[in-house]
Image (spheres, coloured by chain):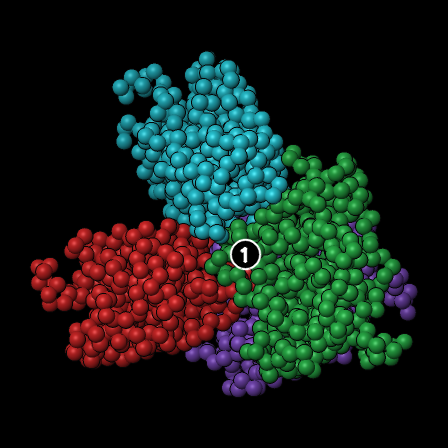
Chain colours: A green, B cyan, C red, D purple
Amino acid sequence: MQNKYSIGILGATGMVGQRYIQLLENHPWFEITWLAASDRSSGKLYGEAAKWRLDTPMPERIANMTVSPADPAGAPRIIFASIDAAFAREMEPKFAAAGHAVISNSSAFRMAPNVPLVLPEVNAEHLHLIEEQPWRKQSGGFIVTNSNCTVMGPVLALKPIADRFGIEQIFATSMQAVSGAGYPGVPSMDILDNVVPYIASEEEKMEEELLKLLGKLEGHAVKPLAARMSASCNRVPVVDGHTVSVSVKLSRQATREEILAAWNEFRPLAGQNLPSAPDQPVEFAPQQDRPQPRLDRNRGNGMAATVGRLRPCNVLDWKFTVLSHNTIRGAAGATILNAELLASLGKLEPVAEAAARA
Amino acid sequence: MQNKYSIGILGATGMVGQRYIQLLENHPWFEITWLAASDRSSGKLYGEAAKWRLDTPMPERIANMTVSPADPAGAPRIIFASIDAAFAREMEPKFAAAGHAVISNSSAFRMAPNVPLVLPEVNAEHLHLIEEQPWRKQSGGFIVTNSNCTVMGPVLALKPIADRFGIEQIFATSMQAVSGAGYPGVPSMDILDNVVPYIASEEEKMEEELLKLLGKLEGHAVKPLAARMSASCNRVPVVDGHTVSVSVKLSRQATREEILAAWNEFRPLAGQNLPSAPDQPVEFAPQQDRPQPRLDRNRGNGMAATVGRLRPCNVLDWKFTVLSHNTIRGAAGATILNAELLASLGKLEPVAEAAARA
Amino acid sequence: MQNKYSIGILGATGMVGQRYIQLLENHPWFEITWLAASDRSSGKLYGEAAKWRLDTPMPERIANMTVSPADPAGAPRIIFASIDAAFAREMEPKFAAAGHAVISNSSAFRMAPNVPLVLPEVNAEHLHLIEEQPWRKQSGGFIVTNSNCTVMGPVLALKPIADRFGIEQIFATSMQAVSGAGYPGVPSMDILDNVVPYIASEEEKMEEELLKLLGKLEGHAVKPLAARMSASCNRVPVVDGHTVSVSVKLSRQATREEILAAWNEFRPLAGQNLPSAPDQPVEFAPQQDRPQPRLDRNRGNGMAATVGRLRPCNVLDWKFTVLSHNTIRGAAGATILNAELLASLGKLEPVAEAAARA
Amino acid sequence: MQNKYSIGILGATGMVGQRYIQLLENHPWFEITWLAASDRSSGKLYGEAAKWRLDTPMPERIANMTVSPADPAGAPRIIFASIDAAFAREMEPKFAAAGHAVISNSSAFRMAPNVPLVLPEVNAEHLHLIEEQPWRKQSGGFIVTNSNCTVMGPVLALKPIADRFGIEQIFATSMQAVSGAGYPGVPSMDILDNVVPYIASEEEKMEEELLKLLGKLEGHAVKPLAARMSASCNRVPVVDGHTVSVSVKLSRQATREEILAAWNEFRPLAGQNLPSAPDQPVEFAPQQDRPQPRLDRNRGNGMAATVGRLRPCNVLDWKFTVLSHNTIRGAAGATILNAELLASLGKLEPVAEAAARA
């Protein structure tokens, strides 16, 4: 236990913060030692400050921890952050400047040129961008981000296709779960017996983040994928799991079998032994009416994307449906997997600790 | 009352059959005088045979009518039919051959070359096709159909755009209500906290029916719109109202204002005084998060389509969301409006009745 | 139109405020001339200040009215109020002291000894309590309240039983719709695929308000019904309509037929021509699986309570289920019906207006 | 593996059948070797015959097993049965007569005088009734049943109270999940935005089964608890987890602390090492708004009942809410726990097998 990395959570009482806590319970490498949230919660026991919304019990040890103020002083070196964009814009550089490794689910810096927006299966090499960050040079601190929760499923499904056949145009229409909006989030009066065809800034995030994730690191910056991408985002009465209808135009023709093979053989992290990496990041469901959020969101412990309904598209080339768990694969699990990748690359070790471990 | 048209309902106990009954209560032109359903219901009182699922009470008079066998003998001349395709394939020609005007919501004959697939606001002139039907020539009977419930909203929204700017490509992703599947229809275990990304044959119907509806009558047949159309259909936990995300590529450039004007000025039935025709078949909702099924499905007494979220599309030209009530505008109301149009054109009058009315 | 009563709405942007506006559109006696809400909304157009959540459009005239500050100056004499208890405790006496007739849905003064808690079908005679109010004597102003939304259905169903057979014990377990909590109200994360077995203060309100409503006016005060009442309140994923399982112990034996007759013959407002009073306030549904909120909440334009499942109880005497629309019968419609009753009794006429009308 | 008990599943494709399969995957004592379902499924691979509705994948090994006809020939000695009552009435005696241990979730024989209706924590001693069964004497076969899914939670919560304070009257109002009705079960048109206040025969089952479970084995029969019990059953839009509001009149006064202690100290199976027995069968949730199905149904791997909201009742003595997972604790898990108890008592060993194990 003494050799685990100490982890601090910024935004610990929110929906994603709760998932960090749930997923890190019994994590082999990481241990939460510090929790911070808004000023309102600071100083309280976590068990009193948080309205726990998950279907596993709040861990006793965490319930009895005191919520710290959101300040680098006293925080461990590694910070998992999931806070709103305005607060992140202020806080995350403050922590990075103080030497912390900020591994963030917040949207504030995802599109900043020197901040890696990373999904380990897709673009691990973008992590080199941290060396472009001023904090890295001064204090050793840095910021790494994961993408918006809705982008995760499509980008996992599209990466092996892009690699083998090239992608020129993408259409994505989402049907998103309410947990993506946090808590209290979506009022029940808005979503029972209803669909809301709008989520603020979501389409813009999907469009730009997807192209950055599929982009290439060239020199000191990422060149986004040169494709046209159109997203339409909708909220539906589902608790967890974002479903996305995707159509895609390829650069080279591909058969159904070739696409299925691309998905099936897509195991970019094989052999790296990252604890949260699913064996198969993209699972194909052969049944004609899948994937479905209630039935498929927990595949790969919530870290696998499920694809199905692959069929020709009359406008572009192929269309399919992809589903992923929005608060695990799409948020908390994404941060944790980024941290595992960083750890395996030796990027989480300050000199002293690295020596101690050796 | 004595001058009203007598109407028979084929499929009277189903979800759409119930809507016929609800919408014809107090209709100024039509009066139900005959109800037929499956053999299982035949001979029972309607009030015992039907499991009424609407939120207005079953009309007393209807509850006390006896359900007839599905046979032309004894049926009035005008038949509204909403029965499954296999049964329709057998029954509807039988009624047409016996001289009945079969105005149908069933899918069996929608794509038959000599059967008009009509939405009065969109392609009233296709009704001339009935003169191509053998039954028409022999007995005066004919079949007229309305489209699949999911097509209605998009086709209403696209018609004025097609007329003014031309349409080359269409993308449509639906989020459909459970009432579209009838009763018992979708099991609750399949849809609570869930999305089902598949509805049997629905994408095919959307794609081909939409192009026929927007097609041109040339000589003895309809030439479908020469556009590429791709549909993706999903079921969501909503009781009534199909929501569709649409993207469209135009033949000529159009500004936002021009599209809004096309919708606003689209009043093809103005002055015809059809009782069920909405004043404005396509209503634009200016709020950024509309249309929504729970809030907008009843516009125009369930007969108007609501459009919203008009914005540029990165892949095609423009995208928007359209919503319509699937069992009113998309089914029972569509049949009734077709019947009103036929009546106003004098197509429902046999010689004797027409004389009596004159 | 000039002879209609001018009505002001206090709390106009809330869920019940919206229902007032919806229900008063085309009301034969009342016309909204003044709207007030929180300071945040004051000065804005209503159309901008309110997030309209109803399935009929916001009336144009109302959308263009400016929201006033919550101050008696400039307000019409008759005020319909639906604001939170703390705010009501401050505001309602202020308006009453200034000579206004405050007809309120707020909970603040329901249990005050000199404030009538009235449901016209149940205890119209309690209105005499307004003469005990200091404001009435000084300025002519007064406060009249209607009950909590969950009490309405049970009290309507129990009143005719109490009158004929006496009631000694009552058990009520509610399954309440989310609209009862206002907007944003219940977070969707709390109620999708869930039941919440707690609503703050609701059980206490049900227990004490029901006994006051069924109580007798004796001298200057109401003596509550001398029965034991136990309520258990639950929130369920329903938009509108509170369903309550009720068991009751009677003072005298009653047969099933006698109870059905008591409900059927319960027409206490017959002949009074109050516009919002349903012909039959308690409708019995004979089907074994009714009442159901989606199917029965709109009976009597949302003003009737529906009862069903009358059957013997092994612990008390009889049990049944009762349903009523919580924001119509249980809130906005209740206020309006109280106002109609007060108008018919001449209690809404200041001297000058009364003369003008005569 | 070779020493595990071979288990046959009768009703393997149903909702409870699926749970047996899910819960027995990796069970330390039991291994499924035979699956039977309706004639329609017989002869197919299980993977083709079953419409799997659970959120964990169907085990490969099971998917590839062939569904057998529902006939004792070829079936293993131990049969877990969950089939409809009419079919059970025919099949279960047939299997028992052929020497099988039929451990059943079906309702057919629960109230038969010589059939034990058992919940291991509550009335393990009732198992002696199997010795009264004719099949037991002739072939060694027998039938043991578990209760209706709605009874489980209340009876677990009431048992320690009955033991310490005595129970005279019980009121129970249920809010039941749709999975309790099987698949396809409840139509979505019946339950979205709705409550159904009726479930056929459910109230009768709750009332009689609860009293038998809390009864005493006296000689050759069970004497039911001499209490009055009234149940009201409702269906709500929840996937899994039955919530029940309970009120109870005790024989002796009890304080809140005494009841909490009764629940907390209730560990009747402690030390028996039954694999599916939860450490604490009745867990108290101290939060004022718990238990809730979405958050609490999986406690104790779905085998614990959660109680909350303990408070005085104005009509009886105490009231509280209890929740349990209806297809785990209330059905499949109950059968398995009964089987584990029977195994630990040596009741599942035929002479030959017992010898082989020794």
Q: Is residue D69 visible?
A: no
Q: Residue at x 56, y 86 (%)?
A: D257
Question: Left or right: where does residue C180 sit relative to residue B233?
Answer: left
Quarter-of-image position of residue A101:
bottom right
Left or right, C23 with reference to B152: left
Left or right of D143 in this view: A267: right
Q: Front-most of A299 and B11?
A: A299
Comparing A259 with A253, the one in front is A253
Side (left or right) of A49 relative to A355: left
D182 relative to C86, above or below: above
Residue B142's place in the image compared with D16, above or below, is above
Quadrant that contains the N terminus of chain A:
bottom right
Q: Chain of mark 1?
A: A
The residue located at (45%, 37%) in the rendering is B258
Residue that carries the numbered disc 1 in the rendered image? A200
User: In percent of the image, x 84 and y 69: which residue is there?
Assistant: A346
User: Which residue occupies 63% across, 77% down?
Assistant: A70
Q: Within 10 Å of the Cα at label 1, are there few (<14), some (14-19), or many (20+) other Cα atoms? A: few
Where residue A74 appears, x then y in whole percent?
Answer: 69, 82
Q: Where on the picture, by quarter, is residue D266?
A: bottom right
Look at the picture and state if C246 lies above or below A71.
Answer: above
**What amino acid does circle 1 point to?**
Ala
Query: Where does the image place residue A282, in percent across and percent down from the top left?
Result: 76, 51
SS label for mark 1:
loop
